[in-house]
Image (tube, coloured by chain):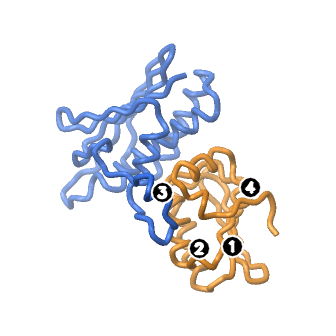
Amino acid sequence: MSLTVHTQYSENAAIITVEGSLDSATAPQLDEQVKEVVQKNPEALVLNVEKLDFMSSAGLRIIIFAKQKLGASVSLTLVKPQEQLIETLKMTGLIHSVHIVDAYP
Amino acid sequence: MKKTFSIPAEPDSLEVIRGHIDSVAEDAGLDKKKAYKLKLAVDEIAANIINYGFQATDSVKEPIEITMELLEQHLSVTLEDHAIPFNPLEKAIPGEEDLKKEPEDRPIGGLGIMLARSNVDDFSYEFSKGKNINKLTIHI
């Protein structure tokens, strides 16, 4: 399954679509694009994870990194996370640091 | 049902391990949620071994041996590795207070081990004959 990552910009938001499995083997692909996006100082970061079937702590670390770099004023939104991903976010308390929506914008 | 295989201690093995768990979980008629939890827990332990277990310059990355055992009430996955001794049950994991913190203020380590421990019903560790033996079990 591996991972595909695609970044686009809309208005002042960066939208990264992530599909497949996000584990410690594939995380560097997303990490690289998040680092690139962060440098452009977007007003919002949106991760479309509707087709993300698996996410380990390697993905959580990228979310934490992004929040740390972007600062509290920049929102981080997850579009349509699957139920198990929401469970992981709840278990680790990160659910309170992200917005969860069914569609963006 | 018992199945044993060994796999290189390389990141690409993680997906292969999850695939094995999926197929056993399907045979066991395990619901998707439980199968995911077991996959996540095993993935975190395996990733830890692969990423941190062989950092000494002279260490040979010996394969990880994985045994999956399906009993009437339980499905267990045992990982045996020759990496440096590491007991996940003794590793400090983020406490409740840490988990409430904003991402800006939280410690970044320990999340994987926390997920491994909290997603299975039983987690045991022993170091025996030069091997780390991690056994993760879920109730069916």
- Residue A73's label in the rendered image is none
The Cα atoms of the two marked residues, 3 and 2, are separated by: 26 Å
Q: Nearer the viewer, mark 4 or mark 1?
A: 4
Closer-to-camera residue (B2/A48): A48
The residue singled out by tag 2 in the image is A33
The residue that appears at 39% across and 44% down in the rendered structure is B45
Q: Residues within 10 Å of mark 4 (few under 14, many from 20)?
A: some
First of labels 4, 1 by sequence position: 1
Q: Residue A73: percent from the left, percent from the top?
A: 62, 79
The Cα atoms of the two marked residues, 4 and 1, are separated by: 17 Å
Identified by mark 1, the residue type is Thr
Element class at badge 1: strand
The Cα atoms of the two marked residues, 2 and 4, are separated by: 20 Å
Element class at badge 2: helix
Q: Chain of mark 1?
A: A
Identified by mark 2, the residue type is Gln
